Image: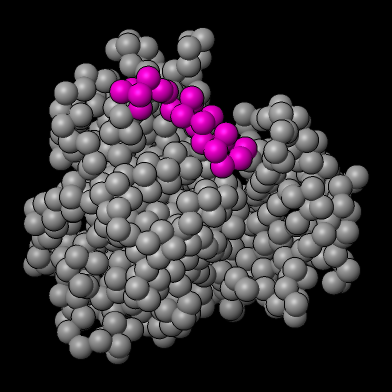
């Protein structure tokens, strides 16, 4: 260690003094012995920070990554803040089936208990929305879910909910970050008393399923009498028992499981990425199961069951995988249609629907035609969940929200995306559509006829260098002289939500939506197209989202051709993947 610069030597010693896990201690020791100063500096001089979903990173030694020490530091910071803000604070803790999730959860529970905070600890693996629901139902002060959702198997995460059960937003995120930095040194070594915590099961689960049955099951008798077959995959995650019970409480016939993927498995052995958004590659086994069982419908959760993907077999024998926006409008129509039949006296203008700024504006067109109040937020359910709570407090009825990344939140059961209640609702919707001699595809086309067709595409490039990401966006900004053309397409407005922010569609050039450190620019085109470029908050991806409304009489094929042309122009003029060395997804 004598060969190391003094600052790096002090970081190494600090790690060895504070870390409680011999395996991660050994990782640092081995790097010291091999004098790998570059790797040591990378791991120790940078600190994992709160982002879109709390913490999410690779599991290995170093302050930059997620491991037992960084979980300890994070939990200490949250515990200290809770005790400062509230008298007799209470929290809940859950976890998925990934490697180390159980240990990270046990450590989290123990630190809260040691700090005098009452804890509700889910003993088995649990769906993320149950943690959000638990915070709301039991009127807790916070909740922690140990999960990396759909990330690769080497990653893990630490998702934080605050009062009311929505994810953290400013200023709480900044207060937590500051509190963590003030409480980095471990307080004690007792991380094995998690069994002293209360278990919210079975009561919280009973309450959750009773509530989704009461609020979201609209056709129980139809479900009882239907013989429709639905295939479900948990994608090696936690969804098996939770979706099974959701089907039961809706009086649906049991789903047909994809046996190879139905149990939690931290290796995710059958998929390259445990993300149902990845298309037919991720759903290959589900399609095979459906074919073998003569089922025309597939539904899929991601590994922590907060998102839902779906596919339908077409008349030509091909399988069509619905996009998040297509599912989004199907659920919007379904929720509103049934809600207004149940509550015909409800004023539509007092019912709120929400989606994110990068999701399809078809929801806005739907809301305008139905007389509903529509709002948009930044990307992420932390924004939509908190806005839903705010509108409810103002006397509105929160109806529904979605984002293009297959996340759906129907009514006020809990204030985060929920793949469990979405699964049973989708199966019920299928039963109903069958009685109308409709498929999801034909029903979607009828919605386009009613509310207008919107061409939409989104994708991403891998961008592993944050400095490169910033330089790509700074080139677009051009020192404040933003572009007015993208190839042949005229730009009429620019919104830049990276601080300090800019929006020339507003009278004072100041954005309405919050600004922050993340890279995010939206372009408004003369032809009605809206394109957003943004850096992901949880993955090394530069994402693009392009939404193109049609005009009356437009042929969908022509709209889609224009969409493709604009996508190519945006990629070539603004992202310049070859020049910048951006890597496309492997299936492109």
192 or 129: nearer the viewer: 129
Residue 105 appears left or right of 578:
left
- Which quarter of the picture shows residue 268? top left
**Residue under the image location 75 percent in, 77 percent down:** 507
370 or 355: nearer the viewer: 370
Q: Position of residue 232 (x, y in %)?
A: 31, 29
144 or 342: nearer the viewer: 342
Q: In this view, does 13 lie above or below 252?
A: below
Can the viewer see residue 459 in this picture?
no
Q: What colour scheme governs how the chains and residues are painted in the rendered image of this protein?
A: one colour
Q: Position of residue 380 (x, y in %)?
A: 49, 59
Residue 439 appears left or right of 365:
left
The question of residue 443 being in magenta is answered with yes
80 or 35: nearer the viewer: 80
**Residue under the image location 30 percent in, 89 percent down:** 84
Q: Where is residue 78 in the image (x, y as percent from the top left)?
A: 33, 77
Residue 37 appears left or right of 10:
right
Q: How many marks?
A: 0
Can the viewer see residue 588 in this picture?
yes
**Residue under the image location 71 percent in, 61 percent down:** 521
**Residue under the image location 42 percent in, 79 percent down:** 172
The question of residue 444 being in magenta is answered with yes
* Magenta residues, dominant SS class: helix
Extreme residue toward the front, this view: 345
Q: Is residue 395 above or below residue 548?
A: below
- Quadrant, the C terminus: top right
First to last magenta residue range: 433-453
């Amino acid at each position: 260690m004598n060969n190391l610069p003094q600052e790096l030597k002090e970081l190494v010693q600090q790690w060895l003094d504070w870390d409680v896990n011999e395996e991660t201690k050994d990782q640092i020791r081995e790097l010291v012995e091999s004098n790998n100063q570059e790797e040591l500096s990378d791991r120790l001089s940078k600190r994992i920070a709160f982002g879109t979903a709390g913490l999410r990173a690779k599991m290995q030694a170093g302050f930059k990554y997620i491991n037992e020490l960084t979980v300890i530091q994070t939990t200490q910071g949250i515990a200290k803040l809770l005790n400062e803000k509230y008298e007799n604070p209470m929290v809940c803790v859950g976890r998925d089936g990934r490697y180390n999730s159980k240990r990270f959860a046990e450590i989290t529970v123990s630190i809260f208990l040691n700090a005098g905070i009452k804890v509700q600890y889910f003993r088995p693996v649990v769906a993320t929305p149950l943690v959000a629901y638990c915070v709301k139902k039991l009127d807790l002060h916070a909740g922690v879910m140990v999960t990396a959702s759909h990330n690769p198997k080497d990653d893990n995460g630490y998702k934080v909910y605050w009062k009311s059960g929505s994810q953290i937003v400013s200023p709480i995120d900044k207060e937590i970050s500051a509190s963590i930095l003030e409480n980095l040194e471990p307080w004690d070594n007792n991380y094995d008393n998690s069994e002293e915590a209360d278990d919210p099961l079975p009561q919280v689960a009973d309450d959750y399923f009773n509530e989704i049955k009461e609020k979201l099951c609209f056709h129980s008798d139809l479900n009882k009498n239907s013989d429709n077959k639905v295939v479900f995959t948990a994608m090696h995650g936690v969804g098996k028992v939770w979706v099974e019970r959701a089907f039961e409480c809706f009086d649906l016939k049991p789903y047909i499981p994809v046996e190879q993927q139905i149990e939690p498995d931290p290796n995710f052995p059958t998929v390259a990425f445990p993300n149902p958004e990845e298309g037919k590659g991720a759903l290959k086994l589900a399609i095979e199961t459906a074919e073998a069982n003569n089922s025309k419908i597939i539904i899929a959760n991601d590994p922590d069951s907060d998102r839902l993907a779906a596919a339908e077999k077409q008349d030509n024998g091909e399988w069509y995988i619905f996009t998040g926006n297509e599912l989004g409008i199907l659920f919007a129509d379904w929720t509103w249609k049934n809600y207004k039949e149940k509550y015909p006296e409800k004023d539509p203008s007092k019912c709120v629907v929400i989606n994110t700024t990068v999701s399809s504006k078809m929801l806005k067109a739907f809301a305008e035609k139905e007389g509903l109040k529509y709002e948009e937020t930044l990307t992420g359910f932390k924004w939509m969940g908190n806005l839903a709570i705010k509108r409810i407090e103002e006397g509105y009825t929160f109806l529904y929200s979605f984002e293009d990344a297959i996340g759906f939140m129907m009514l006020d059961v809990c204030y985060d995306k929920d793949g469990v209640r979405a699964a049973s609702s989708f199966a019920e919707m299928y039963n109903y559509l069958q009685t109308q001699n409709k498929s999801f595809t034909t029903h979607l086309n009828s919605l386009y006829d009613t509310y207008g067709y919107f061409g939409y595409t989104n994708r991403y490039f891998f961008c592993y260098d944050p400095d490169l990401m910033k330089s790509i966006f700074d080139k677009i900004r051009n020192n404040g002289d933003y572009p007015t053309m993208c190839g042949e397409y005229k730009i009429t407005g620019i919104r830049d939500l990276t601080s300090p922010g800019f929006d020339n569609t507003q009278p004072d050039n100041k954005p309405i939506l919050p600004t922050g450190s993340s890279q995010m620019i939206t372009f408004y085109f003369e032809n009605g197209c809206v394109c957003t470029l943004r850096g992901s908050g949880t993955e090394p991806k530069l994402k693009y989202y392009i939404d193109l409304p049609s005009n009356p009489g437009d042929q969908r094929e022509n709209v889609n051709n224009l969409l493709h042309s604009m996508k190519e122009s945006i990629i070539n003029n603004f992202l310049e993947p070859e020049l910048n060395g951006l890597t496309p997804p492997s299936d492109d």
